[in-house]
């Protein structure tokens, strides 16, 4: 009978061999290292996403639409329903079996369209409810605030409706991604149409919502229209939620301006546009020309709120349910069958963002946030309703076609409120990301 | 000069809206001693009476399919289907006509609010009253949001009052450009009428005289064998009706949404405080003064001198008045001074 003798050298040898044996499979499995851990990476059979949308406050209708779209995305990711855009999405990584085989669950928060409330609800979803990604929202102020929080906590933020240049400009963050277009692109898309419709000799008066989105939109539209030869007569800041804008509209009457540009959104736009029309601006003649009103960021829900005042008003949009490409049609069909009405552009952008995140995780093969960020950066895709699209690595802004729309004077249904005048190609709204400054910051993984 | 006249008209119009809401607030405070933060919600409920009335008139009816036609015709509003041109005219006038619905509805809501909730807070501190009425306002808002959604629902003024009035032409000012929306002029006249009617009711009727006496000295009126509580309940109902019909007539100016009452509430409270708590003439004078000042402060020439003055002018004036006249413009001694 041999005797088993363990000396110090053989113990070290055995230990090293055991270590190599145990570690070898891990080398080929992403996310298996302790270092490859980021905040709220799922360990069980489910993954939790955080849907942070305005459920109360002035954008609650838009928020309700976003929530519906995100719930639909979760269904499609889990293989329920007709799959929507999964069938038309150029990437085929998503199989309808959840994300990396884990069933998609979600938790919800109410942004109230207030930065503090939105940060609180996002923080709660991350810290207490295990959300691995946050998406949704209907305001640039909120998007910038939540994006910054997500950067600090190491959780990816797939922004909802946010149009300020700052979101992917001076306030951009490595953990934040925006699918929606921005104010600069609105200006670039609208300018040629404005020139064609209203000429190069115009005098514009701006009424601007007094916060980050309004400021950047005013700047972008001013630059674009002045580039056409238009003169800016006056640019006036108005308080958000003013309700009655009459005291800001009356000075327009005798200003010599022949175009009013409303850098307002949501309820403010509905009110300012309705009241501008009441003051006869649409029927007015100035400098021998018809007075015109322009709403650079337009949406179906706003046109619905403004009623007949929105007829023939020009603006730009990220997407419209009437588009006839396969991706848009699939989404409209799916959403319509589920809820009985067509989706808004806010719903569309949130739905697409949820799918893009899930797809990036599948392609990365892990929920490890830095790897997902890498998968999203520079990602080219199609079939999501906006033509060939690039998630630009330099600023996390989606580069895609932009729509110029007009309030429909002859709607065929209660939803047929915007007519697409022109699909402006992506190349025409491209720009150097350096013009808006900002730093993406590090992609350091964080645990929470 | 044209710009100044237009801003003055605008100030009168704003003042009319502020005064109308502040009047109801003051009436309730002066009679019942209650600080009613749900008053803005009553304004909003009135606006939604107009929305409901319009929805009833335009209820879609499917006309029968014409023989041989491929598709059924588009649904038409019930009134148009049933009454033809008369129906179309009624729909066109739906905003002013919805006052007929708003008066009984708002009276019932007002009386129910007072009897069902507010009377239990008469002897409680003002802080309790503010909390409970503010809570009630939020509940009412959320109910309306649940039923009608959060998106504004536009209401059109009758065609006869659409567009703008050429004020310059009225006064033979051929070179001037002074126009003002017809409906806003109508609203101004309407506000004047309602304010006048409330004052006349309180001044020239026996009922109003008793109410005024009760406002001055509730106990003495009670000792004369008059049930002053009952009359005050009716006054609360009247205040609700005033707020409601003010909301109805405001719908063509501001497409109604569930939080429109809150937007007006804070301003109206400032108006009441500046006018003097419990003073009806004070509320009206302060409403018009602040409306006109706010309007002029929004002129670009003024803002070039003091940037941002348009957003603070009302509060600035309120601070100055309260520093120099602690009871407000026409406040009585003893009110909220215990």
Image (cartoon, rainbow, N blue to C red):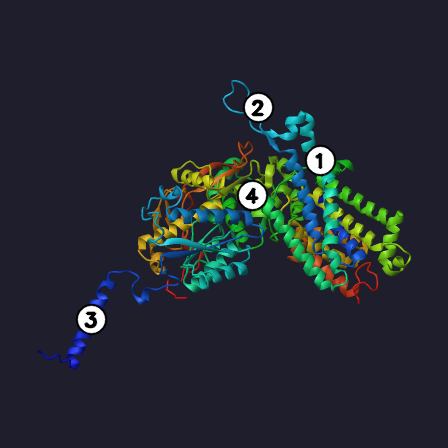
Coordinates of residue A210 in the picture (x, y in percent):
58, 54
Coordinates of residue B42 in the picture (x, y in percent):
70, 49
Q: Tell me the mark number nearer the camera, choosing from 3 and 4.
A: 3
Q: Are marks 2 and 3 on the same chain?
A: no
Residue at mark 4 to residue at mark 2: CA–CA distance = 34 Å
Residue at mark 1 to residue at mark 2: CA–CA distance = 35 Å
Q: Secondary structure at mark 3?
A: helix
Q: Depth check: give the residue in front, B331 or B247.
A: B247
Which residue was labeled with disc 1? Answer: B161
Q: In this image, B285 relative to A183: left or right?
A: right
Between disc 3 and disc 4, whose residue precedes? 3
* Res. A302 mark: 4
Q: Secondary structure at mark 2?
A: loop
Between disc 1 and disc 2, whose residue precedes? 2
Q: Using the rendered image of the protein, determine whether residue A388 is visible from the camera's viewpoint.
A: yes
Which residue was labeled with disc 2? Answer: B64
Residue at mark 3 to residue at mark 1: CA–CA distance = 90 Å
Q: Is residue A95 above or below residue A418?
A: below
Q: Tell me the mark number nearer the camera, choosing from 4 and 2.
A: 2
Coordinates of residue B271 in the picture (x, y in percent):
74, 56
């Amino acid at each position: 009978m041999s005797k088993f003798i363990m000396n110090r050298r053989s113990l070290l040898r055995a230990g090293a061999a055991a270590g190599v044996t145990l570690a070898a499979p891990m080398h080929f499995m992403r996310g298996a290292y302790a270092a490859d851990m980021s905040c709220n990476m799922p360990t069980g059979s489910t993954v939790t996403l955080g849907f942070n949308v305005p459920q109360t406050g002035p954008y609650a209708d838009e928020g309700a639409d976003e929530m519906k779209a995100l719930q639909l995305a979760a269904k499609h990711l889990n293989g329920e329903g007709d799959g929507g855009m999964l069938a038309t999405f150029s990437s085929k990584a998503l199989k309808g079996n959840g994300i990396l085989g884990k069933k998609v669950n979600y938790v919800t928060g109410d942004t109230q369209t207030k930065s503090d409330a939105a940060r609180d609800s996002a923080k709660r979803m991350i810290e207490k409810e295990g959300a691995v990604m946050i998406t949704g929202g209907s305001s640039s102020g909120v998007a910038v605030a939540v994006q910054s929080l997500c950067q600090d906590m190491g959780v990816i933020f797939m922004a909802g409706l946010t149009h300020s240049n700052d979101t992917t400009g001076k306030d951009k963050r490595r953990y934040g991604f925006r699918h929606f277009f921005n104010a600069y692109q609105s200006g670039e898309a609208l300018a040629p149409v404005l020139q064609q419709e209203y000429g190069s000799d115009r005098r514009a008066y701006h009424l601007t919502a007094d916060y980050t989105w309004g400021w950047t939109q005013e700047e972008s539209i001013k630059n674009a229209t002045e580039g056409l030869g238009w003169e800016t007569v006056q640019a006036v800041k108005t308080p958000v939620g003013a309700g009655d804008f009459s005291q800001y509209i009356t000075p327009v009457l005798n200003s010599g301006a022949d175009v009013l540009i409303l850098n307002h959104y949501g309820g403010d736009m509905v009110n300012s546009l309705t009241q501008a029309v009441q003051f006869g601006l649409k029927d007015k003649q100035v400098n021998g020309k018809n007075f015109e009103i322009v709403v650079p960021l337009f949406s179906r829900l706003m046109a619905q709120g403004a009623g007949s005042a929105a007829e023939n008003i020009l603006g730009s949009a990220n997407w419209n349910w009437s588009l006839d490409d396969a991706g848009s049609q699939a989404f409209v069909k799916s959403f319509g069958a589920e809820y009985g009405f067509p989706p808004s552009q806010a719903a569309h952008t949130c739905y697409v963002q949820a799918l893009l995140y899930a797809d990036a995780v599948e392609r990365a093969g892990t929920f490890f946030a830095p790897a997902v960020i890498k998968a999203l950066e520079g990602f080219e895709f199609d079939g999501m309703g906006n033509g060939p699209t690039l998630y630009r690595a330099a600023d996390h802004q989606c580069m895609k076609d932009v729509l110029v729309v007009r309030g429909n004077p002859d709607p065929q249904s209660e939803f047929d409120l915007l007519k697409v005048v022109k699909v402006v190609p992506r190349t025409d709204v491209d720009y150097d990301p350096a013009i808006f400054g900002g730093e993406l910051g590090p992609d350091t993984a964080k645990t929470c | 000069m044209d710009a100044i006249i237009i801003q003055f008209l605008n100030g009168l119009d704003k003042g009319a809206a502020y005064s109308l809401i502040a009047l109801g607030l003051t009436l309730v405070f002066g009679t019942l001693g209650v600080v009613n933060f749900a008053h803005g919600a009553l304004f909003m409920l009135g606006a939604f009476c107009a929305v409901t009335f319009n929805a009833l008139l335009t209820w879609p009816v499917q006309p029968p399919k014409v023989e041989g036609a491929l598709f059924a015709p588009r649904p038409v509003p019930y009134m148009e289907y049933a009454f033809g041109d008369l129906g179309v005219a009624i729909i066109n006038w739906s905003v002013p006509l919805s006052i007929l619905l708003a008066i009984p509805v708002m009276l019932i809501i007002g009386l129910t609010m007072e009897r069902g909730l507010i009377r239990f807070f008469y002897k409680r501190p003002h802080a309790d009253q503010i909390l409970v009425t503010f809570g009630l306002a939020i509940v009412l808002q959320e109910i309306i949001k649940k039923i009608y959604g959060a998106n504004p629902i536009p209401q059109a003024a009758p065609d006869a009052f659409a567009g703008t009035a050429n004020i310059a032409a009225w006064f033979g000012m051929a070179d001037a450009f002074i126009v003002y929306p017809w409906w806003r002029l109508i609203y101004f006249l309407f506000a004047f009428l309602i304010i006048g009617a409330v004052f006349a009711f309180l001044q020239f009727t026996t009922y109003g005289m008793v109410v005024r006496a009760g406002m001055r000295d509730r106990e003495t009126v009670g000792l004369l064998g008059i049930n002053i509580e009952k009359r005050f309940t009716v006054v609360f109902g009247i205040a609700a009706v005033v707020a409601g019909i003010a909301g109805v007539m405001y719908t063509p100016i501001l497409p109604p949404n569930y939080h429109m009452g809150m937007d007006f509430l804070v301003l109206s409270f400032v108006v009441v405080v500046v006018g003097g708590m419990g003073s009806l003439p004070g509320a009206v004078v302060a409403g018009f003064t602040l409306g006109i000042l706010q309007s002029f402060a929004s002129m670009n020439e003024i803002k070039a001198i003091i940037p941002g003055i348009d957003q603070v002018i009302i509060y600035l004036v309120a601070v100055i008045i309260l520093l120099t006249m602690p009871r407000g413009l026409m406040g009585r001694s003893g009110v909220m001074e215990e």
